[in-house]
Amino acid sequence: MAMTITEKILSKSSGRKRVEPGENIWLNVDVLMTHDVCGPPTIGIWKREFGSDAKIWDKDKLVIFPDHYIFTKNPQANRNVEILRQFASEYKVDNYYDVGTERYKGVCHIALAEEGYNIPGTVLFGTDSHTCTSGAFGMFSTGVGNTDAAFILGTGKIWEKVPESLKFTFEGELPPYITAKDLILQVLGDITTDGGTYGALEFDGEGVFSLPVDERMTLTNMAIEAGAMNGIIAADSVIEAYVKERADKSFEIFKSDPDAQYKAKYRYDVSKMEPHLAKPHSPDNLDLVRNVHGTNLTKCYIGSCTGGKLSDFRSAAKIIFGSKVKVPTFIVPASTSVARQLEEETISGVSLKQIFEDAGCEVAKSSCAACLGGPSDTVGRAKDGEVVISTTNRNFPGRMGSKKSSVYLASPLTVAASALTGVITDPRDFM
């Protein structure tokens, strides 16, 4: 019987020859990831339920990244990091990447890739809804709640239902003004924020495989915005090379069978697409950038696991180079590696970081920062009455700060163009 890539990976993890959508199965987890927001409650539940002699099922498979509320004076946020620090010390967790040290990496979803934890054909769970980012590596990756994570921490297993798959094929050659953010916003506009509920969103086609690795991660990252369990892209030679540079592990590559069954299939010609954005207050409130051209802005934000990768800053820097921004603009690298590359990579002899600083942007430390709102002293946080255009992944009321602010979601090209004018601007005006 034919299977999709998601079904094949879950079949392997469960030790079964085949699985079908709707079946409940036990999975053997290859990696469990947590961070400073959900790590402390996960640890608390684990200790309570497994007792004073609780043991981690496999310390080598547990990864902890403080990344959300870290560059803040908020005592509760600081206490969360201290709990992780104490836990890692007490249980000798080697894969703990503490803030304030050379080991600090930045946003968990990007760090998982950079540090070699994303391995094709494996199963990864994390205490964060955007854990589905890792699906860009041909693996099954999804977010779970603290109780499920605590169970994994103690047993290495989890009980899951096999999702139905939906396939999105992007054909044709991508125009230079179209990015992965435009593609996923198109999908969300078509199927809405509940159109993929408990499904597996599979991305395919020339338009997908022409994308660099970090752009593919934008597609799978925002699968959760459709309510999906996971997003996934089959691993190719580009992914193989990326993984082999960062991990010394053997792996198996899975691909969907040609006659695999899907709940739905969608096809797009990327050559005919225009720049998109999501209007307040939902990622599926789709519109063309040109339709809202001229909307006044108070702030621009380029960052997060969705929009703070090297490819995002390369795109933005090409538009901003040699100009000045008209409104406060925040540049927040998703990882410390990306931050270093902003200093090393140049355009006409000028580093990307310098391009942004010369334009009047504020370049912040690597973290989730304002993507999740955060304490009042969080860099880039939206205030009452602000209208923000951002490369982040959610624009629900209060997501980036004040519930009385409005957030538009767009590509780094669109955000950069808008920063130069102070109003929502089609990037094609600068390309």
Image: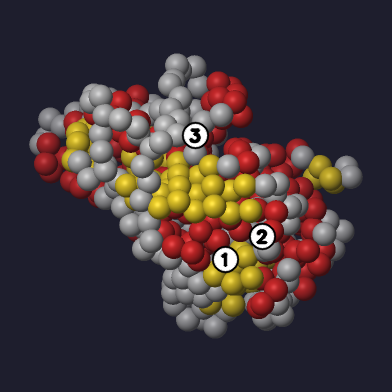
Q: Are marks 1 and 3 in contact (CB under 8 Å)?
A: no
Residue 290 relative to residue 32: left or right: right
Residue annotated with mark 1 = 409
Asked if residue 64 can be seen in this view, the reply is no
Q: Which amino acid does label 2 sit on?
A: Met
Residue annotated with mark 2 = 273
Q: What residue type is labelled 1?
A: Leu
Q: Where residue 149 sits: x, y (%)?
A: 25, 42
* Lower sequence index among marks 2 and 1: 2
Which of the 4 image quarters holds residue 13? top left
Which of the 4 image quarters holds residue 387? bottom right
Give residue 315's mark.
none
Label 2: element kind:
loop
Which one is closest to the eye, mark 1 or mark 3?
Answer: 3
Packing grade of label 2 (10 A; few <14, some 14-19, many >=20) is: some
Packing grade of label 3 (10 A; few <14, some 14-19, many >=20) is: many
* Lower sequence index among marks 1 and 3: 3
CA gap, disc 2 and disc 3: 23 Å
Asked if residue 249 can be seen in this view, the reply is yes
Residue annotated with mark 3 = 234
Q: In which quarter of the image is the N terminus?
A: top left
* Lower sequence index among marks 2 and 3: 3
Q: Where residue 12 sits: x, y (%)?
A: 30, 26
Q: Which residue lies furthest to the front in this view?
A: 259
Q: Where residue 226 sits: x, y (%)?
A: 41, 59
Q: Do the residues labelled 2 and 1 touch (CB within 8 Å)?
A: no
CA gap, disc 1 and disc 3: 27 Å
Q: Where residue 392 sits: x, y (%)?
A: 54, 59
